[in-house]
Image (cartoon, rainbow, N blue to C red):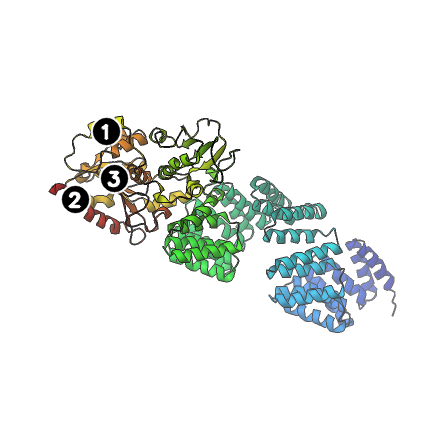
Amino acid sequence: MDTSADPLVAQGLALHQSGRLAEAEKHYRLALAQDPRHFSALHLLGVVCLQTGRLDDGVDHLQQALLIRPDVPAACTDLGTALIRLNRFEEALSLCERAIRIDPLYGPAFGNRGGALVQLGRSEDALEAYRRQVEIDPANARAHLNVGTVLRSLGRLEDALDSFDRALAAAPDFADAFRYRGVTLFDLGRLEEALESHSQAIVLGGASAQGYLGLGTTLLGLRRLDDALLFLDEAIQAQPTFSQAHSYRGVVLAELDRPEEALDAFSRAIALDPGNVHAFCNQVGTLLALGRPGQALASCETALTLDPDHAEAHHNKAAVLYELRDLEGAVACCNRAIALKPTLAEAYNARGVALFELRRLPDAIASLEAGLVHAPGDAEARHHLAMVRLANGELRPGWALYESRRETRQFARMRRSLAQPLWLGQHTLAGRTLLVHAEQGLGDTLQFCRYVPRLADRGGRIVLEVQPGLAPLLAGLAGVDHIVTRGEPLPPFDVQVPLMSLPLALDAGPESLSSPYLVADPARTAAWARRLGPAHDLRVGLVWGGGTRPDDRVAHLTDLRRSLPLSALRPLLEVPGIQFHSLQLGPPAQQLADLRAREAIWGSIRDVAPDLQDFSDTAAAMAQLDLVITCDTAAAHLAGALGVPVWILNRFDACWRWFGGDGATPWYPSAKLFRQAQPGDWDSVIAPVKADLQHLSAARLGD
């Protein structure tokens, strides 16, 4: 029935449809002044209130409208929209179902029903509702988008991508569909396509904070870190309170090795949103990098309080427990993370590393291989699997996997950008010059230079590049035509190979060139013989500390487990007939001076380290010794390469190259390995070393 208010409502609707909401509202209110029970005026005024953020007013007007006309599905659905936004999901669901009973073909009711069900955690039911809306209105791009978002939440990424493509077929300029498509492509690992999709979302949807976030996170995945930071800053400029943008900005800064700035970004994200689990999780690695494991653990606990089923938070807690050397706890956290998210490759990797250090090698291999099923291109996992397989004596597959080391973060700084092609034994070297370049530590070079003489069988000319201090010693290595110290200009060469790739290139094991394969310089050896004088007792060299590398966190943490305090060697000083000589260089050498100031017995150690100018000197000094006792450092490899008897003190999680870590080793016939019975238990190493030293001394004295 027409009323005098109808023209005002019609005028208001025209204004409403043109986006002039304030003027439309004025007309609706004028209509209601004339007819307080005008259904359309109440309904449309309620909609304007929703559009302008006045949810409670909107609910009030829509409820009044439904009291007048309870059989209008659009009003039921619009009230459902308001209730969803007010987090009153059960009431919203009831209204949507009422609308559907009134008109089973009213598509928006199914759309709102899906929205309420999503919020109630009933994803499969929501998917059914959204799909029903698509059946009713196949050209509804928003309905296709909603189907896609639910499919994505269910992990059905390919199906979700298809729905987003259908949304774009219906509405080619639909910015949200491009954005969700970009996120899904990112999850599928199709990062270049994701970048293109996010860029298109920005073009169509304008400079939105969400759009810039999508670009920034995709660029982060592509390792274009400076570009990622630029777009995340744009997201923050567009929306300064955007907690997620600050959080991802922290991730990028951490990757750029700017930990203090990263921590500031995470703190800002948390201040803006104390419930931001992502920020709490991602600041864990930064806190560990800054040497704050206690705070890192607290951050994990906060994240898990906010979301006990957050798989990444359990994985992060595993990382902290690993650093705190609670390996069993780390494994348990990884197990929980995997149970919650079976596709979380990082958790399989972390579990594999912890199991490796627990010396549960078959379990470690199984975990790492399972992770690679979900992330086959993960260089970190392939590198860890290489070390486990090598430690397990599986040399051929281990060396092949070990090539992945150059793609890992730990070795990124060692990566060489050489124009010449990589040689891995695939063709003859005849008529070519091969550059063999050292890539890791000094000990690695001393150990793997054994393979250089084998290259003579392949023809060609060999240029060997080594670290400073090694050239004088290695210049006489068989097969080397020219030696150069790293940092010096390289001579022309045709192909190149990292030194530690030679076992793969030559299909060679540790026994391929047995020691001794290095020889101390005769003149220096004679000089050291004069310096040390006649030998009345057994001469034993000592090295108790490795090279400290605080710039390499992985190497630094390993050294903390590998090195032992000099004081732990005190029982050895009680063995008669021994003259100990310190070969210790670097900061750990100070321990000898400190102990001498406190106890006279330490004065019995002769400190020859200050006279060691380079490795040729060390080799010549070792040639005068009957035995070297050392932890896993360059000294162990040098003594073994010279054929000098060497006893190697191994941490519980001995380096992969020592295989079992105890007893004999095929790398050096003159070496004997002593391994901790438990992590950190140096007494279990020193006791058998002392016993063997007593037997050795007794045999010498008996002679």
> Helix, strand or loop at disc 2?
helix
User: Callout 1, which amino acid?
Assistant: Trp
Q: How far apart are marks 2 and 3 (CA)?
A: 15 Å
Instruction: Residue 300: tell me if it is visible.
Output: no
Q: In front of the other: label 2 or label 1?
A: 1
Q: How far apart are marks 1 and 3 (CA)?
A: 17 Å
Disc on res. 542: 3
Counting residues from the start of the chain, the first of labels 1 and 3 encountered is 1
Residue underneath mark 1: 528
Vertical order, 547 against 103 (above or below) = above
Counting residues from the start of the chain, the first of labels 2 and 3 encountered is 3
User: Callout 3, which amino acid?
Assistant: Leu
Instruction: Return the x and y of residue 586 as percentages of the image width and height.
Output: 32, 35
Which residue is nearer to you in this view: 191 or 390? 390
> Circles 1 and 3: CB distance less than 8 Å?
no
**Quarter residue 60 falls in:** bottom right
Instruction: Return the x and y of residue 154 as percentages of the image width and height.
Output: 60, 62
Residue underneath mark 2: 574
Which residue is nearer to you in this view: 110 or 12? 110
> Helix, strand or loop at disc 3?
strand
> Helix, strand or loop at disc 1?
helix
Instruction: Return the x and y of residue 166 as percentages of the image width and height.
Output: 72, 57
Image quadrant in which the C terminus is located: top left
